[in-house]
Amino acid sequence: MSILVDEDTRVVVQGITGGEGKFHTEQMIEYGTNVVAGTSPGKGGQEVAGVPVYDTVEEAVEAEDADASVVFVPPAFAADAIFEALDTDLDLVVAITEGIPTQDMAKVNKRLDEVDTRLQGPNCPGIITPGESKLGILPGNIFSEGNVGLVSRSGTLTYQVVDSLTQRGIGQTTAIGIGGDPIIGTSFIDALELFENDPDTDAVVMCGEIGGEDEEEAAAYIAEHMDTPVAGFIAGRTAPPGKRMGHAGAIVSGSGTGTAASKIDALNDAGVPVGDTPEEVADDVEDLL
Amino acid sequence: MRLHEYQAKDVFADAGVPTPPSALATTVDEAVEHAEEIGYPVAVKAQVHVGGRGKAGGIKLVENAEEAREAADAILGMDLKGYHVDKVLVEGAVDFKNELYVGITMDRGEGKPVAMVSTQGGVNIEEVAAENPEAIAREHIDPAFGMHPYQARKAVYDAGVPKAVARDVASVLTTLYDLWENNDASDAEINPLMITEDDEVIAADAVLNVDDDALFRHPDLAEMEDEAAEDALEAKANEYGFDYVRLDGNVGIIGNGAGLVMTTLDLVDYYGGKPANFLDIGGGAKAERVVNALDMVFSDDNVDAVVFNIFGGITRGDEVAKGINEALGQFDEIPKPVVVRLAGTNAEEGREILNDELVTVEETLEGAVQRTVEYAEDEQ
């Protein structure tokens, strides 16, 4: 079992003819992802990596009976690409694109209230169910099949933690990167709920970072609704207020909200151990299992 | 991107927000000339990107030419919380009976813009928000429709703005929302919005921060970026296209991915060192980017040792290693010790390629950070 994606997930790649789109389509297919179509306006009828290209997402979904899309469209056009995907009956849209204007995402966010499709990201590495399917840019070789779910706001930090787990023989059900932007489609709570309801996930790792209050809200959710144990990590303990630490969302406001300390306290209060180092997170997971 | 007050005021005035008469000066004579034209009293205001300018001595109210000269002379060239002042805004002082706060920002928790109004203007609004949150009326806005006029009226009534000016304040708020949207702002604020004895409303300050990710569709705003207002190294980072933040420690940090770089900073602190910077070189690690990153960190005089932490995902460790060798090969002498930690795809091959004479290679993140902290201590 897993969450959101598995070997049967039929995937459309939006922006498949671009450099990133093409490269990662090849990587996804090599990993075993069932990529059934790509889209690129004006390039319908072509093929990329053996995958048929359509002009619109609607055509691609209808012709190939797709369930999910991955968005590799450049930031200026990415919100439009997401709107296009949300207007079809896809179950899941994974937006990899970094640098989408926040006001565009506010409009997308409003649309999400009106449709059943789930958005993951943007500015995220994607999602992987080891041994079955990956949607996005995650390096498949560091993941292994197992019983730990992982949800994270950051890409390479996810890899770091997964690497520590895999090297100890602890595999993963699914790993999901929710993205480092201020407005994202799938929150920590959404992902935690999915893991809680997945019978094969025996423990969850949650990697947060400074900025916003999502981790605090997730802590309250864990305390109230979760039986599956959770181990946590928070990046940005040393970040000064008012400075954006790479991610658009990773900023401690002048009034002191969004600090690492507030997030760590909230998680500890919810019974979640928070490691000081990525290795300590792996230790915590071993203890929880 | 932050606009200076004088730039934001131009944008606000163009949109129809009432602002006092003002003019920008870069010399003392120019400032006095503007003050004479505007008529006393005037405020002489430092144009730098720091909050609390008034308390720090960056804003002075003057009554005559002599005082204007003294004030401009004191403020121009001063160091205000680490920022050099090279321009002042000379502005007609407003005789007011009340000071309000109005602002538009993105409420990330709700994923929607929010309009805020308070009768407690003129002070740090974040302090008001922390100590007395009910003193700020909030109205969330549907970004698909924009702000309905009734929402502006509601926020103004909820905040308890005096009836005599409610209509005008609501009108300013609607204008502020429109300019926030039209300029892809992250924040648009007027603090204080002054109410005069004659019940006129005037924006005595203006804050406009623009979403960096949206600058591509606002070339006019992008041109307003004042590079002199930035830290020299941060300006250089902009040029190289790095996410960089300068800190005050002595351990230089280079890595890929915001979360992992933040974690590396945290570990430096955890093992007793002090981070000198946050530097995310992003995906890939072509030799040129590696050279630029090392150049950035080496040009910070505070740096005593550098940790280079790359988790190769799609990027292969052997390619990164070649980039590092090539980069360090360009220096006659490596100015500061460099510790490299490679992990992920082809990390082992990468470690074999790295030249031990140029760098110290560590296998684990924790090990690399501890080693770098030791080097930094030894160098001191």
Image: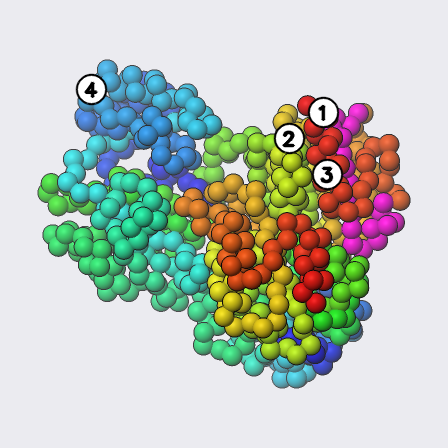
Looking at the rendered image, the disc whose residue lies closer to the viewer, 2 or 3, is 3
Q: Amino acid at mark 4?
A: Asn
Residue behind mark 2: B250
1 or 2: tag closer to the N-terminus: 2
Of labels 1 and 4, earlier in sequence is 4
Residue highlighted by disc 1: B379
- From mark 3 to mark 1, how far is it between C-alphas? 14 Å
- 2 and 4 marks on the same chain: yes
* Residue in the picture at 26% in, 40% down: B122
Dot label at residue B64: 4
Quadrant of the image containing the N terminus of chain A: bottom right
* CB within 8 Å, label 1 to label 2: yes
Return the residue at label 3: B370
- Are dots 1 and 4 on a single chain? yes
* Residue B349 magenta: yes
Say which label, 2 or 4, has the lower sequence index.
Answer: 4
Place of residue B141 in the rendered image (x, y in percent of width and height, measured from the top left): 35, 63
| Quadrant for the C terminus of chain A in the image | bottom right
Give the camera-side residue of B152 and A2.
A2
Judged from the image, the secondary structure of the residue bearing numbered disc 4 is loop
